[in-house]
Amino acid sequence: MKRSISTLVAAVVCAGIFAGAAVARTAESSATKLCGNVSASSVSSVIGYTVPPAIGTTLTAKATKENDGIAGSTLICSFGSAKTMAALKKTVEVSYETVSKSLNAAEVKVLVNRTASLTGGLHVKISSYSGLSGESYLMSFSESGITVESLVSANGTKLYGATVYGNLASSKLASLVKLAEKL
């Protein structure tokens, strides 16, 4: 792959908070333990195929001028692998993010678009989504021959998300976001 798809997704999906910031990204046992709050079987029942237990990764960023002074921490639970393109297409991620200030949909859109431009000019399609608590939005983009779809719900300083590397009905993405609320 030309660029790491999972890194691009993490940057774009995490509300663009990490644009231009020094980000610490670590896979760790404590993060994986937290991911155990969402079972592989519950994810599998939503998407219609079997996924392995999640591996947890945390991202943290300090407030900087580039990210509009917003600090954040994200837990990403990856059910699957990014080792091959075929494996990536079966990977599902659910996430929980805390940020240092509440963001409205317009602010999120600005941050996501800024991140997309920093990661090589990705064209991210963003639209509102109703049916979840808080402000919710769908995002999609294509890179290296794969389509990435995400749904994020923002409640104050907490954001819950779900990402797939392919096409999935928005109602199923919403079910995955509801699972992310267990993190």
Image: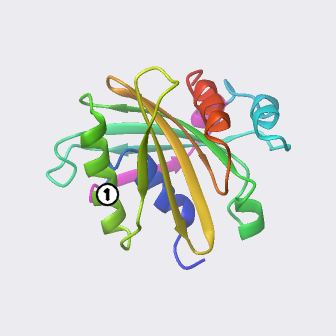
Task: Tell me where residue 79 appears, x and y as whole percent.
Answer: 71, 44
Whether residue 163 sits left or right of residue 39 in the image: it is left
Span colored in magenta:
20-35
Whether residue 121 sits left or right of residue 44 in the image: it is left
Q: Is residue 66 above or below residue 145?
A: above
Task: Tell me where residue 119 appears, x and y as whole percent.
Answer: 38, 68
Q: How is the image coloured?
A: rainbow
Quarter assignment of residue 42: top right
Task: Tell me where residue 107 appears, x and y as whole percent.
Answer: 24, 41
Is residue 163 shown in magenta? Answer: no
**Quadrant in which the C terminus is drawn:** top right
Q: Secondary structure at mark 1?
A: helix
Whether residue 16 sits left or right of residue 4 in the image: it is left
Mark 1 surroundings within 10 Å by alpha-carbon count, few (fewer than 14), some (14 through 19), many (20 or more): many
The residue sitting at 55% across, 23% down in the picture is 181
Quarter assignment of residue 44: top right
Amino acid under disc 1: Asn
Residue 84 appearing in the image: no
The residue lying toward the viewer, choosing from 180 and 63, is 180
Q: Which residue is mark 1?
A: 113
The residue sitting at 52% across, 24% down in the picture is 131
Q: Residue furthest left?
A: 65
